[in-house]
Amino acid sequence: MSWLHPTYLWTLALVPVVVLLFVWAAWQRRQASARFGDSALVQRLTKGLSPRRRRWKASFVTLGVLLMSLTLAGPQCGTKLREVTREGVDLVIALDVSLSMQANDVAPNRLERAKNEIKKLLDQLRGDRVGLVIFSGDAFIQCPLTTDYGAVRLFLDVADPSLLPTPGTDFSAALETAVQAFDVPSETDQEDRTRALLIVSDGENHVPDINAIVQDARASNIILYTAGVGETEGVRIPISRQGQRVSYKKDNEGNDVTTKLEEAVLQDLAADGAYFRIARTSSSLSEIISSLERLDKTEFGADQFEEYDPKYQWPLALALFLLFAERFASDRRRTKKDKEDPFIV
């Protein structure tokens, strides 16, 4: 025996309260009879009332309250194994952690805003395996493919430009590392798993041959999606130490370096998939869910768990029966005339 809502077992405390109320009501009746006058006269006047029937009616109400409390707690009996198949797509998220992602044209900055939007995306995924790659001028697998979205969030939180000292933004490195992440064997060991790569970046690419990257993705059976973070107006790139801004990035001549969202590059990369925008006050990244749902699903495995059989219907039915019986039962003794009348209980 187990309980679906064990917190409702506190309502069992109402049972002794109901008993005390009935005891108090009986004491009040005795006190009223004593104040009325001669006890023999009172007994003759109330000889039609049955104390035993009153006790039965009180028992019905008490048992009804007890059974209602058990119904609220949700009794469950017996267990059976249920198997649920896990299926979805393999999704690798490649997050740009280059220095330009520190620009604050979106609050608090591009990188932190991208992290927040990815976390919202994880909340909407169901059954898909997700991996995380971080890249700048180089790339590495931050989190391998997993269905544990909590682990992905933990690795996402620590993603930072300091993890990749190589400057720049290299989409080809992100793709090559993503291919390595996809090659992790699955539980079903299927070779034709659906692969999707989401590149989250501001689009500043230092490798000019975008078409070659798209062709490489097609050759690896990877569907490319992109999400652009930032605004199209140029902003300066802050340099921070220990969380405090100390200056702005400058070129060799001492001029401030500016960065802006390069949407055209990201749109070219997403020729076979879709492009999404993470702007200052809005984001369309959640729309990738409908795109992923249209892809062929792959079975990753099956989970077994115990399922209990709910039995709340029985105490509920008995409680209702007892409460209705108490409502329509009379506390008067049945006379010979009453026994001849079928409508008197």
Image: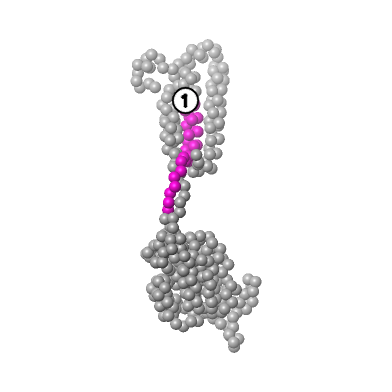
x then y, percent, for residue 139: 53, 74
Instruction: Name the residue at the top extreme.
Output: 40
Specify the farthest residue to the bottom. Answer: 253
Residue visible at 47% across and 74% down in the picture: 175
Colour treatment of the image = one colour
**Quadrant in which residue 240 is drawn:** bottom right
The reply to whether residue 242 is in sight is yes
The magenta stretch spans which residues?
A: 58-84
Closer-to-camera residue (55/180): 180
Question: On the image, numbered disc 1 is attached to which residue?
Answer: 57
- Asked if residue 287 shows in the view, the reply is no
Q: Nearer the viewer, residue 97 or 18?
A: 97
Identity of the residue drawn at 52% across and 78% down? 169
Q: Nearer the viewer, residue 8 or 95?
A: 95
- x%, y% of residue 138? 54, 77
* Magenta span includes 78: yes
Residue drawn at 44 percent across, 55 percent down: 302
Asked whether 79 falls inside the magenta stretch, the response is yes
The location of residue 278, given as percent across then percent down, is 47, 70
Q: Secondary structure at mark 1?
A: helix
| Label 1 crowd (10 A; few <14 / some 14-19 / many >=20) | many
